[in-house]
Protein backbone atom coordinates (compact mmCIF):
# COMPACT_ATOMS: atom_id res chain seq x y z
CA UNK A 1 0.00 0.00 0.00
CA UNK A 2 1.28 3.45 -0.97
CA UNK A 3 -0.27 6.63 0.42
CA UNK A 4 0.59 10.17 -0.63
CA UNK A 5 0.28 12.34 2.49
CA UNK A 6 0.18 16.11 1.96
CA UNK A 7 0.14 18.12 5.18
CA UNK A 8 2.26 20.10 7.63
CA UNK A 9 5.61 19.15 9.13
CA UNK A 10 7.27 20.13 12.41
CA UNK A 11 10.88 19.55 13.40
CA UNK A 12 9.98 19.09 17.08
CA UNK A 13 6.97 17.10 18.19
CA UNK A 14 4.25 15.31 16.30
CA UNK A 15 1.53 16.99 14.25
CA UNK A 16 0.62 16.80 10.56
CA UNK A 17 2.89 14.49 8.63
CA UNK A 18 5.07 14.19 11.74
CA UNK A 19 2.06 12.49 13.38
CA UNK A 20 0.70 10.60 10.36
CA UNK A 21 3.68 9.14 8.52
CA UNK A 22 5.17 6.94 11.24
CA UNK A 23 1.90 5.18 12.26
CA UNK A 24 1.29 4.34 8.60
CA UNK A 25 4.81 3.00 8.26
CA UNK A 26 4.37 0.84 11.37
CA UNK A 27 1.32 -0.64 9.67
CA UNK A 28 3.44 -1.55 6.66
CA UNK A 29 2.45 1.34 4.41
CA UNK A 30 4.83 3.16 2.10
CA UNK A 31 4.00 6.77 2.95
CA UNK A 32 5.07 9.49 0.51
CA UNK A 33 5.27 12.73 2.48
CA UNK A 34 4.80 16.12 0.84
CA UNK A 35 4.89 18.94 3.38
CA UNK A 36 2.74 22.08 3.25
CA UNK A 37 4.58 23.95 6.01
CA UNK A 38 7.95 23.54 7.72
CA UNK A 39 7.68 24.76 11.31
CA UNK A 40 9.95 24.36 14.33
CA UNK A 41 6.99 23.12 16.42
CA UNK A 42 3.20 23.12 16.30
CA UNK A 43 1.35 26.39 16.72
CA UNK A 44 -0.31 25.30 19.95
CA UNK A 45 2.77 26.52 21.79
CA UNK A 46 1.92 30.08 20.76
CA UNK A 47 5.34 30.70 19.23
CA UNK A 48 7.06 28.92 16.37
CA UNK A 49 9.49 29.50 13.54
CA UNK A 50 9.51 28.40 9.92
CA UNK A 51 7.41 29.07 6.88
CA UNK A 52 4.38 28.06 4.89
CA UNK A 53 5.42 26.36 1.67
CA UNK A 54 3.77 27.41 -1.58
CA UNK A 55 1.34 25.50 -3.71
CA UNK A 56 3.79 25.49 -6.62
CA UNK A 57 6.31 23.56 -4.52
CA UNK A 58 3.64 20.99 -3.66
CA UNK A 59 2.79 20.64 -7.36
CA UNK A 60 6.46 20.33 -8.27
CA UNK A 61 7.04 17.55 -5.74
CA UNK A 62 3.96 15.63 -6.86
CA UNK A 63 5.03 16.00 -10.49
CA UNK A 64 8.41 14.57 -9.56
CA UNK A 65 6.71 11.54 -8.01
CA UNK A 66 4.52 11.23 -11.10
CA UNK A 67 7.64 11.22 -13.28
CA UNK A 68 8.84 8.13 -11.45
CA UNK A 69 5.84 6.34 -12.97
CA UNK A 70 4.43 5.24 -9.61
CA UNK A 71 1.10 7.08 -9.27
CA UNK A 72 -0.76 4.04 -10.64
CA UNK A 73 0.39 2.19 -7.50
CA UNK A 74 -0.88 4.91 -5.16
CA UNK A 75 -3.66 3.62 -2.90
CA UNK A 76 -4.81 7.10 -2.02
CA UNK A 77 -4.12 10.66 -0.93
CA UNK A 78 -4.33 11.91 2.65
CA UNK A 79 -4.47 15.65 3.30
CA UNK A 80 -4.56 17.64 6.54
CA UNK A 81 -3.46 21.12 7.62
CA UNK A 82 -2.79 23.51 4.76
CA UNK A 83 -1.18 26.92 5.07
CA UNK A 84 -3.42 28.70 2.54
CA UNK A 85 -6.12 27.97 -0.02
CA UNK A 86 -3.55 27.97 -2.84
CA UNK A 87 -1.90 24.93 -1.28
CA UNK A 88 -5.34 23.38 -1.07
CA UNK A 89 -5.77 23.71 -4.82
CA UNK A 90 -2.40 21.99 -5.26
CA UNK A 91 -3.70 19.14 -3.07
CA UNK A 92 -6.76 18.75 -5.28
CA UNK A 93 -4.51 18.78 -8.34
CA UNK A 94 -2.53 15.92 -6.77
CA UNK A 95 -5.75 14.00 -6.11
CA UNK A 96 -6.76 14.43 -9.76
CA UNK A 97 -3.35 13.19 -10.96
CA UNK A 98 -3.52 10.13 -8.70
CA UNK A 99 -7.10 9.31 -9.72
CA UNK A 100 -6.17 9.62 -13.39
CA UNK A 101 -3.42 7.05 -12.86
CA UNK A 102 -5.48 4.86 -10.52
CA UNK A 103 -9.25 5.44 -10.65
CA UNK A 104 -9.71 3.29 -7.52
CA UNK A 105 -7.52 5.55 -5.38
CA UNK A 106 -9.12 7.09 -2.29
CA UNK A 107 -8.94 10.68 -1.13
CA UNK A 108 -9.10 11.15 2.65
CA UNK A 109 -9.51 14.79 3.70
CA UNK A 110 -8.90 15.81 7.30
CA UNK A 111 -10.53 19.27 7.20
CA UNK A 112 -8.35 21.02 9.79
CA UNK A 113 -10.30 24.17 10.63
CA UNK A 114 -10.59 24.53 14.40
CA UNK A 115 -11.84 22.98 17.60
CA UNK A 116 -14.26 23.50 20.46
CA UNK A 117 -12.88 26.12 22.83
CA UNK A 118 -10.35 27.44 20.31
CA UNK A 119 -12.63 28.27 17.43
CA UNK A 120 -11.20 28.63 13.94
CA UNK A 121 -7.39 28.62 14.00
CA UNK A 122 -6.50 28.55 10.31
CA UNK A 123 -6.06 31.43 7.87
CA UNK A 124 -9.04 33.20 6.29
CA UNK A 125 -10.38 31.36 3.26
CA UNK A 126 -9.26 27.90 4.37
CA UNK A 127 -12.51 26.87 6.12
CA UNK A 128 -14.48 27.82 3.01
CA UNK A 129 -11.99 25.97 0.81
CA UNK A 130 -12.54 22.78 2.78
CA UNK A 131 -16.33 23.20 2.73
CA UNK A 132 -16.69 24.14 -0.92
CA UNK A 133 -13.81 22.40 -2.67
CA UNK A 134 -12.00 19.69 -0.71
CA UNK A 135 -14.81 17.91 1.16
CA UNK A 136 -16.99 17.45 -1.97
CA UNK A 137 -13.98 15.87 -3.72
CA UNK A 138 -13.19 13.46 -0.88
CA UNK A 139 -14.11 9.81 -0.42
CA UNK A 140 -13.35 9.93 3.31
CA UNK A 141 -13.47 12.91 5.68
CA UNK A 142 -12.36 13.03 9.33
CA UNK A 143 -13.74 16.17 11.02
CA UNK A 144 -14.01 16.80 14.73
CA UNK A 145 -17.36 17.97 16.13
CA UNK A 146 -16.53 21.67 15.66
CA UNK A 147 -15.51 21.12 12.05
CA UNK A 148 -18.59 19.03 11.30
CA UNK A 149 -20.79 21.86 12.55
CA UNK A 150 -18.95 24.38 10.35
CA UNK A 151 -19.22 22.15 7.30
CA UNK A 152 -22.92 21.35 7.71
CA UNK A 153 -24.42 24.03 9.95
CA UNK A 154 -25.63 21.29 12.31
CA UNK A 155 -24.18 20.99 15.82
CA UNK A 156 -23.81 17.27 16.71
CA UNK A 157 -24.97 17.80 20.29
CA UNK A 158 -27.37 14.84 20.34
CA UNK A 159 -27.55 11.44 18.68
CA UNK A 160 -30.19 12.64 16.23
CA UNK A 161 -28.23 15.81 15.42
CA UNK A 162 -24.96 13.91 14.92
CA UNK A 163 -26.67 11.52 12.52
CA UNK A 164 -28.32 14.42 10.66
CA UNK A 165 -25.00 16.28 10.39
CA UNK A 166 -23.30 13.21 8.96
CA UNK A 167 -26.11 12.72 6.46
CA UNK A 168 -25.75 16.35 5.39
CA UNK A 169 -22.02 15.88 4.89
CA UNK A 170 -22.60 12.69 2.88
CA UNK A 171 -24.90 14.70 0.62
CA UNK A 172 -21.94 16.97 -0.16
CA UNK A 173 -19.97 14.04 -1.58
CA UNK A 174 -17.95 11.93 0.90
CA UNK A 175 -18.88 8.27 1.21
CA UNK A 176 -17.28 7.69 4.61
CA UNK A 177 -17.03 9.97 7.66
CA UNK A 178 -14.98 9.56 10.82
CA UNK A 179 -16.26 11.98 13.47
CA UNK A 180 -13.86 12.56 16.36
CA UNK A 181 -14.17 14.29 19.77
CA UNK A 182 -17.93 13.75 19.89
CA UNK A 183 -19.75 14.84 23.06
CA UNK A 184 -23.51 14.37 23.05
CA UNK A 185 -26.25 15.22 25.52
CA UNK A 186 -26.80 12.35 27.94
CA UNK A 187 -23.38 10.77 27.41
CA UNK A 188 -21.28 9.76 30.40
CA UNK A 189 -18.90 12.72 30.94
CA UNK A 190 -16.14 10.22 31.75
CA UNK A 191 -16.15 9.06 28.13
CA UNK A 192 -15.51 10.53 24.69
CA UNK A 193 -17.05 9.19 21.49
CA UNK A 194 -15.92 8.57 17.93
CA UNK A 195 -18.38 7.77 15.17
CA UNK A 196 -18.02 6.31 11.71
CA UNK A 197 -20.69 6.77 9.08
CA UNK A 198 -20.75 4.86 5.82
CA UNK A 199 -23.86 6.43 4.31
CA UNK A 200 -26.68 4.27 5.73
CA UNK A 201 -24.54 2.56 8.39
CA UNK A 202 -23.37 4.39 11.50
CA UNK A 203 -21.24 3.06 14.34
CA UNK A 204 -19.93 4.53 17.57
CA UNK A 205 -17.06 3.78 19.94
CA UNK A 206 -16.83 5.27 23.41
CA UNK A 207 -13.48 5.33 25.20
CA UNK A 208 -12.54 6.66 28.65
CA UNK A 209 -11.80 10.38 28.72
CA UNK A 210 -8.15 10.99 29.53
CA UNK A 211 -6.70 13.95 31.47
CA UNK A 212 -4.63 15.55 28.75
CA UNK A 213 -4.64 18.26 26.11
CA UNK A 214 -2.31 17.56 23.20
CA UNK A 215 -1.98 18.25 19.49
CA UNK A 216 -1.57 15.74 16.69
CA UNK A 217 -3.96 13.01 17.80
CA UNK A 218 -6.44 13.98 15.08
CA UNK A 219 -3.71 13.75 12.44
CA UNK A 220 -2.70 10.31 13.67
CA UNK A 221 -6.22 8.90 13.81
CA UNK A 222 -7.05 10.17 10.32
CA UNK A 223 -4.04 8.25 8.98
CA UNK A 224 -4.91 5.11 10.95
CA UNK A 225 -8.54 5.20 9.86
CA UNK A 226 -7.61 5.67 6.21
CA UNK A 227 -5.19 2.74 6.24
CA UNK A 228 -7.63 0.38 7.92
CA UNK A 229 -10.50 1.43 5.66
CA UNK A 230 -8.36 1.08 2.53
CA UNK A 231 -7.42 -2.44 3.61
CA UNK A 232 -10.85 -3.68 4.68
CA UNK A 233 -13.44 -1.48 2.98
CA UNK A 234 -15.29 -1.66 6.30
CA UNK A 235 -15.91 1.56 8.23
CA UNK A 236 -16.80 -0.34 11.40
CA UNK A 237 -13.52 -2.29 11.45
CA UNK A 238 -11.55 0.85 10.59
CA UNK A 239 -13.23 2.71 13.46
CA UNK A 240 -12.50 -0.06 15.97
CA UNK A 241 -8.85 -0.37 14.97
CA UNK A 242 -8.17 3.37 14.81
CA UNK A 243 -9.98 4.14 18.08
CA UNK A 244 -8.19 1.33 19.93
CA UNK A 245 -4.77 2.46 18.70
CA UNK A 246 -5.32 6.14 19.43
CA UNK A 247 -6.59 5.42 22.93
CA UNK A 248 -3.47 3.40 23.66
CA UNK A 249 -1.30 6.23 22.34
CA UNK A 250 -3.11 8.86 24.40
CA UNK A 251 -3.16 6.71 27.54
CA UNK A 252 0.62 6.31 27.36
CA UNK A 253 0.95 10.06 26.76
CA UNK A 254 -1.28 10.93 29.73
CA UNK A 255 0.58 8.55 32.04
CA UNK A 256 3.86 10.24 31.12
CA UNK A 257 2.43 13.75 31.50
CA UNK A 258 3.84 14.63 28.07
CA UNK A 259 2.94 17.79 26.14
CA UNK A 260 3.62 15.87 22.92
CA UNK A 261 1.97 12.59 21.91
CA UNK A 262 4.40 9.71 22.55
CA UNK A 263 4.31 8.49 18.98
CA UNK A 264 7.57 6.55 19.20
CA UNK A 265 7.32 5.17 22.73
CA UNK A 266 3.76 3.94 22.11
CA UNK A 267 4.34 2.65 18.58
CA UNK A 268 3.24 -0.93 19.33
CA UNK A 269 -0.26 0.43 19.91
CA UNK A 270 -0.58 0.97 16.15
CA UNK A 271 -0.05 -2.71 15.43
CA UNK A 272 -1.39 -4.47 18.54
CA UNK A 273 -3.49 -2.11 20.69
CA UNK A 274 -3.31 -2.93 24.39
CA UNK A 275 -7.06 -2.28 24.75
CA UNK A 276 -9.61 -3.20 22.12
CA UNK A 277 -12.87 -1.28 21.73
CA UNK A 278 -15.86 -2.68 19.89
CA UNK A 279 -18.07 -0.41 17.81
CA UNK A 280 -21.82 -0.46 18.35
CA UNK A 281 -24.55 0.40 15.86
CA UNK A 282 -25.40 4.07 16.29
CA UNK A 283 -28.98 4.71 17.41
CA UNK A 284 -30.46 8.15 16.77
Image (cartoon, rainbow, N blue to C red):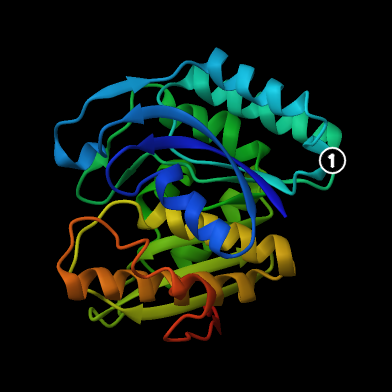
Q: How many marks?
A: 1
Residue 252 position by quadrant: bottom left
Q: Point out residue 96 in the picture as x, y percentages from the top left corner.
A: 74, 29
Left or right side of 194 for 251: left
Q: Is residue 105 above or below residue 28?
A: above
Q: Nearer the viewer, residue 205 or 237?
A: 237
> Residue, x 18% and y 62% (percent of image)?
258
Residue 248 position by quadrant: bottom left
Q: Quadrant of the N terminus?
A: bottom right
Q: Point out residue 137 in the picture as x, y percentages from the top left corner.
A: 67, 37
Q: Point out residue 69 in the picture as x, y percentages from the top left corner.
A: 83, 31
> Residue, x 69% and y 68% (percent of image)?
200
> Residue, x 41% and y 51% (percent of image)?
19
Q: Is residue 52 above or below residue 281?
A: above
Left or right side of 265 for 143: right
Q: Point out residue 48 in the picture as x, y percentages from the top left corner.
A: 20, 30
Classed neighbour count for the residue bearing mark 1: other residues with Cα under 10 Å, few (<14), some (14–19), many (≥20): some
> Residue, x 36% and y 58% (percent of image)?
217
For label 1, the residue is: 102
Residue 144 position by quadrant: bottom left
Q: Secondary structure at mark 1?
A: loop
Amino acid sequence: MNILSIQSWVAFGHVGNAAAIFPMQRLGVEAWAVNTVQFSNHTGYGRWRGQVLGGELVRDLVQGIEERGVLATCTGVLSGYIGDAGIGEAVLDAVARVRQANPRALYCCDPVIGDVGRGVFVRPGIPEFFRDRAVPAADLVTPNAFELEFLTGVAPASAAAAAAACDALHAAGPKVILLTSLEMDGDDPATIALMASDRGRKFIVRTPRLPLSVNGAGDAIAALFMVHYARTGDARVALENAASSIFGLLRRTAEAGSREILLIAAQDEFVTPSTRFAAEPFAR
